[in-house]
Every structure is written in C-alpha cells, then in structure tokens.
Amino acid sequence: NKHLASLRSELHNTHLDICKSYHPKFPELEELITDPFQYRAAIGIIQNEEDVTNVNEELNDVLSSNQIITISVAGSTTNGRMLTQEELNQVNDACLYLDELQSVQNELTSFVESRMEQWSPSVCALVGPALAAQLLASTGGLAELARVPSCNLQLLGKNRSTSSSRGGMATQSRTQHAGFLIDCDLVQSCPNYLKMRAVKAVAGKLALAVRCDHINVESGRQRTADVGRKFKEELRIKFGKWEEPDKAQVVKALPKPDLTTKKRRGGKRIRRLKERFEETELMKQANKRAFSVEAGEYGDDAMGITLGMLDTKEGGAMRNTTEKRKMRQANTKASRKRAAQMSAGVADG
C-alpha cells in the first residue's frame, strides 16, 4: 500500500512534467483532457501535427467523439507553436516513463487484489476485491482507510471537475459527487434515480466493515467476512424495498350508524346552566315574525334583519313586568364559603 501511494504521487508529478513540456504546443489540451493516461495517449498521437483533424482516426481509439470534436476546434484556434526536436524528445521520454509507472502500478494493484481477501475479508465481501484494492491504494492502507468517515468514502476516486467536464466533455462518464463506490455491484443493481442514495448507504456500511477488519488486525483476532456478508445482505434487502411500488391507499368503510337514542345527562347542574343562559323576553319578541306585514325593499328589512314583534303594535310590551324565576343557589362548599365572607363583610361595615 505504501508503494502504491508513492507510485500515485510519482504518476501525478510525471503528468505535470508532461503537461509543462507540451504546453507550448497545445496549452488547451491539459484542460480538455484531465485523465493523465488519456492525455499521454493523445499527445503520443498528435505529436507535432499542426492540423489535429489529420489524426482524428487514430484518436478514435483512445478518446470519445465529443472529445475529438472539442480538441479539433481548440486545435484550430490555439496559440501554440511547433516544438523543437529536443522538446519533442523530452516529451516522448516523459511519456515512456509514465508508461513504465502505469505497468508497475497495474502489477502492484493485481497483487493487492489477490491478497485482499486475506487482509480485509469483510470489505471484500461487501464491495469486492478489486474495489477494495482501489480504496486501500487511494488512502495508503487499512489503518488510514479506517480513519476516513463515511461521507468522505463515497468521494474517494472522484474526478476533478473542469470547465470541459461541466460542459459535457468529460474524459470519463463518472457521476458527480461519487467516486469508486459508484462501480460497486450493489449500486449498479439499482436504477439511476436511486444510485446516489445507494452510494451513501454503501459508504456507511463500508466504514463499519473497514473498522471491524482493522480492529481484528490490531487485536490479533481471526479475520472473517461475516460482517461484510451481513451488511451486504442488509443492503440488498433495503434496496429491494426502495424499488417496491407504494402501497395503494385502503378505502375504509364508514362505521355502522348508531340509531338508538342516547341518554342526555341531566340534573341540577344542567338545570342551573339552562336558567343562567335562558332566553329573555326581549329576545323572544325580537325573534318572532308577524305575518302579512309590509317590509321594505332595501336595507335591513329586505335582508330579514328586523326587530320582529317589537316593531309592531301587537308586540313591544317591554314595560310589562314578568315574573322571573329565581335561580336556586347551589349548596356547595365554595358557595357556602363565599356567602360567609359576604355576611362577614356586611357585619364589619
């Protein structure tokens, strides 16, 4: 893993040297093609060619059609110059060195993949040995990978966004905000609208599986793939539930109506309440309506808002004294206490 990390750093430095050496010829190319190996293949074909369209057929083997069109347009308007023979030899030597680094990296990666099931069985059971080797190589080892939180695990291996990639001319069709985990079998089995959600779920379980393997290594316990298999089965069941259609809403029948007459609670309390809010004689007269009485066509009369029998000769007996029933006093503890306080106040006065 340490060798893979140093190789990755050396590959990056070599790519920068190639970009610096080829910049005088085609300065826009390093922005259009961000992948170092595709960039190396492209300049190996273009070399010192003035018209890029002359090598479009050779570029079809290493680049997509959109990239070739973009490079052709940029090559026709570039401000670059022809390289000297010495500069061109320097570029070719750097490309050969990059090829050697790539072959060494492939050998080390294949070796790590063959040993991954022994080093980290749970991670291999969850995402596969090839993807586990890429994750370990990108972080530098199992201990370093165990320190990475799940929110950053899903971004390991994410391509750098450029102006060309945002314009649809990316060198790789990788989803934004997703790295190596987008190639996981569990994620690829989901439909496109669920893939980013699945990447987050896989990253959460992967963080736990990596820490289980790391703890087993540190404590000297036997390394098993039980945790990885358990997590993979849980994720498979969860993803299956995500794809299930929503359940139809069940229309419940109305309850059987209760046609029996319910008993209304009565007693002294209800009678006292009715006496307190009893309708007055004035309101009774106002609510009555006289028949065969002319009413206005406009205003409140037309809307039915009148004084009722109070506005007629037959009604309006407001001054007649009516016998008012006296409300019986409640014989409760609070009423007796209130009456005692009132009688004591009168005696003191």
Image (cartoon, rainbow, N blue to C red):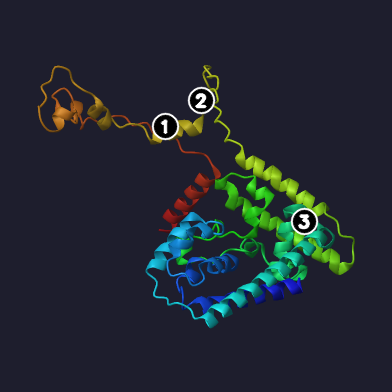
Q: Quadrant of residue 242?
A: top right
Q: Provide residue 120's location: percent of width, then percent of height.
A: 80, 61
Identify the mark at residue 274; answer none if there is no mark.
Answer: 1
Secondary element type, mark 1: helix
Identify the mark at residue 241; answer none if there is no mark.
Answer: none
Dot 2 corresponds to which residue? Answer: 264
Q: Which mark is first along the chain, 1 or 2? A: 2
C-alpha distance separating marks 3 and 2: 73 Å
Q: Which mark is first along the chain, 2 or 3? A: 3
Front: mark 2 or 1: 2
Front: mark 3 or 2: 3
Mark 2 in CB contact with mark 1 (< 8 angstroms): no
Outermost residue toward the bottom in this view: 86
Q: Quadrant of residue 298?
A: top left
Query: In the depicted view, which residue is nearer to us: 234 or 12?
Result: 12
Q: Is residue 332 above or below residue 347?
A: above
Residue 308 can be seen, yes or no: yes
Q: Residues within 10 Å of mark 3 (few under 14, many from 20)?
A: many
Q: Is residue 11 above or below residue 275?
A: below
Query: In the depicted view, which residue is nearer to us: 243 or 126?
Result: 126
Query: In the depicted view, which residue is nearer to us: 38 or 270?
Result: 38
* Residue 287 located left or right of residue 65: left
Dot 3 corresponds to which residue? Answer: 124
Q: Provide residue 66's location: percent of width, then percent of height.
A: 46, 56
